[in-house]
Image (cartoon, grey):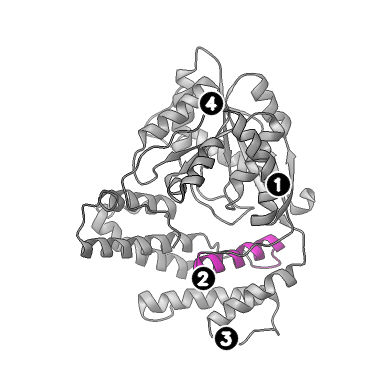
Amino acid sequence: MHKIIVEKPYHFVAPHPGRFWPRLIALLLPLYLRRWHGVVQVDFRGLEHLRASVSSGHGILLTPNHCRPCDPMVLGLLARAAGQPFFVMASRHLFEQHPLQTWLLRRAGAFSVYREGLDRDALRAAVDILRNASRPLVLFPEGVITRTNDRLNPLMDGMAFIAHSAAKQRADRGQVVIHPVAMRYLFEGNLEAALTPTVEELERRLSWRPKHQLTLHERLAKVGVALLGLKEVEYFGEVRPGPVAERIQRLIDRLLVPLEAQWVKGQGDGDVVARVKRLRTAMVPDLANGDLSEDERVRRWAQLEEVYLAQQLSFYPPDYIEGAPAHERLLETAERFEEDLTDHARVYSPIRAVVTVGPALPVSPARERGVADPLVEQVRASLDKLLSVPREALL
C-alpha cells in the first residue's frame, strides 16, 4: 500500500510564486524522465490552442488524464514549450515525504490539497490562480493514477466547481477556459525482452515454474486470474465462479459495503474512487489528529488497507488485455501487478510521450445546483476524443 495517508494533522502548503525555479527545474526534466521513468522523448500537439489562450489573457485550467506517475513532469515540459510555467494542485502526501521534495515541489509551482476532507485553502488558491490568470493551473480530474493511458476513469466534479467559481469572480475581467490535455505513452522497445523478467518474477511469487510455452499476453492473463483468486480465497474462503468483471465487482463490494455500513450510513453510490474518497473522509481525520487508542489505530489502518485494495482492483479493466492488446496495455498491466505486489514498478525504456492539448472550453460563471454539471461531461467527452486517437496516428 502506497503511503498516501499521512498520520498527522494537515497544514496547507502554498505554491512558490516565482518563475525562476520552474524554468530551471524544467531544464533538468528530460534527464529525470529518462533516468527514472524511461521517457526518452516528448512530443506536443495542439500547442497552438494553449498559446492562444495565454496570449488572450484567459484564466486557464488544464485537465489532463493521469495514467503514469511521471505525468506532472511531462507537463513541466509542456509548460516550457508554451513559454508559461504552471501551478499544479497535488495530493498532500507528496509534501510529507522529505523536506527537499517539499521545497522542490513548491518551487516547481505545486501546492497541496487534502483529499480526505474539505480543503478550503487549496480551493481558494486554485480559484485565485484562475481569477487572476497568473498562470495556467493543472488539476488532474481523475484524482488518481490509473495506468491506463488510452482510457479515462470517472472525473471528479471538483474541477467544475473551481472553474465556475473563478469564472464568476473574473466575469468583469475576462474569461476562464478549460483545456483538456491527453497524455499517451508509447513503448518503442522490444516488449518481449523488457517484460519477460517481470513476468517470470510474478510467476515465481506464485510458486510457478516460468510458463515459457505461453505468449506474454497469455502469461499476464494467467497471473491476473491467479492473483484475483488468491484475494477471493482471502475474503470469501474460496475462488468464486463467473466472468472476471463480475468477480472483481463482487470482491470490491465485499471490501467496501461493510465499511460503508459502519462509516457512511450505507451510502455506496458512485464509482469506486468516489466511494473510497467518501470512506477516507470519514475514517482519516481522527487518525491524523492522534485521537485514537492503539487498538483502534491498528483497526483503522487495516480498514484503510481494504479500502486501498478495493480502489486498486477497480483499476484493472477486465477487457484491457483481451484480443490483440497494444504493447502499452501489456506494459501497464505488468507494471500494475508489480506495483500492487511490491509498491514498486521497474523502469521500462524507451517510452515516447505524446501530449495533445484540446481546444479551449469556455466556462460559464453560472452553475446550476442539484444536477450533474454539464461542464464535467464536456471535459470528459473532449478527453475521450483525444485519447481515442489510434496508436498508429501517434507514431
Residue type at numbered disc 3: Trp
Indicate the secondary structure of the residue bearing disc 3.
loop
Q: Based on the displayed image, in which of its 4 quarters is residue 181 positioned?
A: top right
Q: Check disc 4: other Cα within 10 Å, few if <14, some if 14-19, many if 20+.
A: many
**Residue 333 part of the magenta segment:** yes
Q: Which residues are magenta?
A: 322-343
| Residue 278 rendering spot, x and y as whole percentages | 34, 49
On the image, numbered disc 2 is attached to which residue? 244
Q: Check disc 3: other Cα within 10 Å, few if <14, some if 14-19, many if 20+.
A: few
Disc nearest the viewer among 3 and 4: 3
Residue type at numbered disc 2: Val
294 to the left or right of 13: left
Query: Which of the marked residues, 3 or 4, is nearer the chain's N terminus?
Result: 3
Q: Which mark is residue 30?
A: 1
Residue type at numbered disc 4: Val
Give the CA distance from mark 3 to mark 2: 21 Å
Give the CA distance from mark 2 to mark 1: 39 Å
Query: Which of the marked residues, 2 or 1, is nearer the chain's N terminus?
Result: 1
**Residue 4 part of the magenta segment:** no
Q: Based on the displayed image, in which of its 4 quarters is residue 216 positioned?
A: bottom right
| Residue 303 rendering spot, x and y as whole percentages | 32, 63
Kindly indicate whether the residue at mark 3 contacts the one at mark 1 (C-beta within 8 angstroms). no
Give the CA distance from mark 2 to mark 4: 40 Å
Indicate the secondary structure of the residue bearing disc 1.
helix
Disc nearest the viewer among 3 and 2: 3
Q: Residue furthest top?
A: 172
On the image, numbered disc 3 is attached to which residue? 208
Q: Relative to residue 166, is residue 37 depicted above or below?
A: below
